[in-house]
């Protein structure tokens, strides 16, 4: 993977159309900005109960977006990442429909996970209380089978997302078949979606077990053998991310987004600096994604202190709600069918009160943090909360999943922030100092982030009290200073 800025996007929600249109946009309006593209689920169907994360057929491109040849063509100009949804598939899949029709006689019976497979002696209240679940209600759904029988199937997320038995031969064959399809169509990296929930074991939380790490290791090796890198997507305690990073190609830095917000809100870089001194270097950095802004990633867990205290997290969440004029509250917690507050659903731009300066500073910090940066399509264009879409769908995360088109992109590209953002992206892509050594120093409200590679160096300096920020670049025996304030025409 190139150490350049990448784009995260849905095909249809950015283009209003299909894969060929996305390719045209990337080669025209967004030309030379992104070395890689994380294509959010484009499998059949893209409009299920979870925006493509509940595939009926994981190896079929939704025909409304094109076909595998279109994906392959897109991959000729950009490194492509796709989601491997390891935990579940749609209840409408032919495989699960076969189970409903034939029960245990179905050739796909072993592909799915039932309660009895994990708890053959029955599920005790003690074991039930230990299971970690991010959604309210039971993690099982009862389905009727032939001959007046029924079975409780694991449905970690929704009753339309049937959990796969990844330990079975059928489960392993299923995942390998997807990997081979990806390999044949220019997919260079996979994002292991919901991997933390994939392994269930009686008497445990059924989340991020020792056996889960073993599963990730095996699947990563299988992907590597096909020329595919792996990115693990897990929201958990920050030390867990450090452990995972030692065992996979890439891991997300999910602690960065809330820490950047906390720093700007409190004018104190201490927590961010502590994290960036110990954070994994083989990471993908984000500020926003198709999901919400993670909170669990910086909080305490099981009596162990977090990067932020509970009081600091409360203040962080309240400030987001205030900055977004209460819009984030309409899309978060119970409004998003979450059992606890582990994510806040809001655009990052609205979380920062639509302040162009604060948002540009946040992006500069992301680009200077260790790792390869990814920029979400709505974040690239500084989109505001999609309240109309939220009111129509009643899906909390839709607040940050707008539908755009070429005209909307054209209008957004004329905004002062977007122009400044593009300059930052080009700077991050073209400066070789980012391939060198990283250092960070802060004194509460001031921050210095530096990269040095042989004779090349680049430094970001931020002062949150004076509201100024600039970048110093030294290369080819010359130096220059770029003011973020000037980029926004604020000085």
Image (spheres, rainbow, N blue to C red):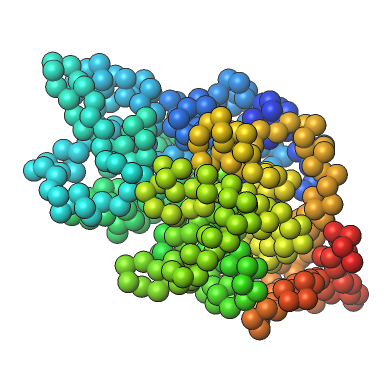
Q: In the picture provided, is 196 more to the left or to the right than 29?
A: left
Name the residue at 23% across, 55% down: 130
The picture places residue 207, in percent across and down from the top left corner, at 32, 53
Q: Residue furthest bottom?
A: 443
Residue 365 drawn above or below residue 199: below
The answer to whether residue 339 shows anywhere in this view is: yes
Name the residue at 61% across, 72% down: 266
Q: In the picture provided, is 411 more to the left or to the right than 282?
A: right
Numbered marks: total = 0
The picture places residue 222, in percent across and down from the top left corner, at 42, 46
Instruction: Compare residues 144 and 282 and report the one nearer the observer.
Output: 144
Name the residue at 31% across, 37% down: 155
The picture places residue 437, in percent across and down from the top left corner, at 66, 75
Residue 43 drawn above or below residue 229: above
Name the residue at 82% across, 55% down: 420
Residue 90 drawn above or below residue 164: above
Instruction: Compare residues 442 and 36 and report the one nearer the observer.
Output: 442
The image quadrant that residue 239 belongs to is bottom left
The picture places residue 406, in percent across and down from the top left corner, at 77, 31
Q: Residue furthest left?
A: 121
The C terminus, quarter of image: bottom right
Instruction: Compare residues 300 and 89 and report the one nearer the observer.
Output: 300
The image quadrant that residue 468 belongs to is bottom right
The answer to whether residue 230 shows anywhere in this view is: no
């Amino acid at each position: 993977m190139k150490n350049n800025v990448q784009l995260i996007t849905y095909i249809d929600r950015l283009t209003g159309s299909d894969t060929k249109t996305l390719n045209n946009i990337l080669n025209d309006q967004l030309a030379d900005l992104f070395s890689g593209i994380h294509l959010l689920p484009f499998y059949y169907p893209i409009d299920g109960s979870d925006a493509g994360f509940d595939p009926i057929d994981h190896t079929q491109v939704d025909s409304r977006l094109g076909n595998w040849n279109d994906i392959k063509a897109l991959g000729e100009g950009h490194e492509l990442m796709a989601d491997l949804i390891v935990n579940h598939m749609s209840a409408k899949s032919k495989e699960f429909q076969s189970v409903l029709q034939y029960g245990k006689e179905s050739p796909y019976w072993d592909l799915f996970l039932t309660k009895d497979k994990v708890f053959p002696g029955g599920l005790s209240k003690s074991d039930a209380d230990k299971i970690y679940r991010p959604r309210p209600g039971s993690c099982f759904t009862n389905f009727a089978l032939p001959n007046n029988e029924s079975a409780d199937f694991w449905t970690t997320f929704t009753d339309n997302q049937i959990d796969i038995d990844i330990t079975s031969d059928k489960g392993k064959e299923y995942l390998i078949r997807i990997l081979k399809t990806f390999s044949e169509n220019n997919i260079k990296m996979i994002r292991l979606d919901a991997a933390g929930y994939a392994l269930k074991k009686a008497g445990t939380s059924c989340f991020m077990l020792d056996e889960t790490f073993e599963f990730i290791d095996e699947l990563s090796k299988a992907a590597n053998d096909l020329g595919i890198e792996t990115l693990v997507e897990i929201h958990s305690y920050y030390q867990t991310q450090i452990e995972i990073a030692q065992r996979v190609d890439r891991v997300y830095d999910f602690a960065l987004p809330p820490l950047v917000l906390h720093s700007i809100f409190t004018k104190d870089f201490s927590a961010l600096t502590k994290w960036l001194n110990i954070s994994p270097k083989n990471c993908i950095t984000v500020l926003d994604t198709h999901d919400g802004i993670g909170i669990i990633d910086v909080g305490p867990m099981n009596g162990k202190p977090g990067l932020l205290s509970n009081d600091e997290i409360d203040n962080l969440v309240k400030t987001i709600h205030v900055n977004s004029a209460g819009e984030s509250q309409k899309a978060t917690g119970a409004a998003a069918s979450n059992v606890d507050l582990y994510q806040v659903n809001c655009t990052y731009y609205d979380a920062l009160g639509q302040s162009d300066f604060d948002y540009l500073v946040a992006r500069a910090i992301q680009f200077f943090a260790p790792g390869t940066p990814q920029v979400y399509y709505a974040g690239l264009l500084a989109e505001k909360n999609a309240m109309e879409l939220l009111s129509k769908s009643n899906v909390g995360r839709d607040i940050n999943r707008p539908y755009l088109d070429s005209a909307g992109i054209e209008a957004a590209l004329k905004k002062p922030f977007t122009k400044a953002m593009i300059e930052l992206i080009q700077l991050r892509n073209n400066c070789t100092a980012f391939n060198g050594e990283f250092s960070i120093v802060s004194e509460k409200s001031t921050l210095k982030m530096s990269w040095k590679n042989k004779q090349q160096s680049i430094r970001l300096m931020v002062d949150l009290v004076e509201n100024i920020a600039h970048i110093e670049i030294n290369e080819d025996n010359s130096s220059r200073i770029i003011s973020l304030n000037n980029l926004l025409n604020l000085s």
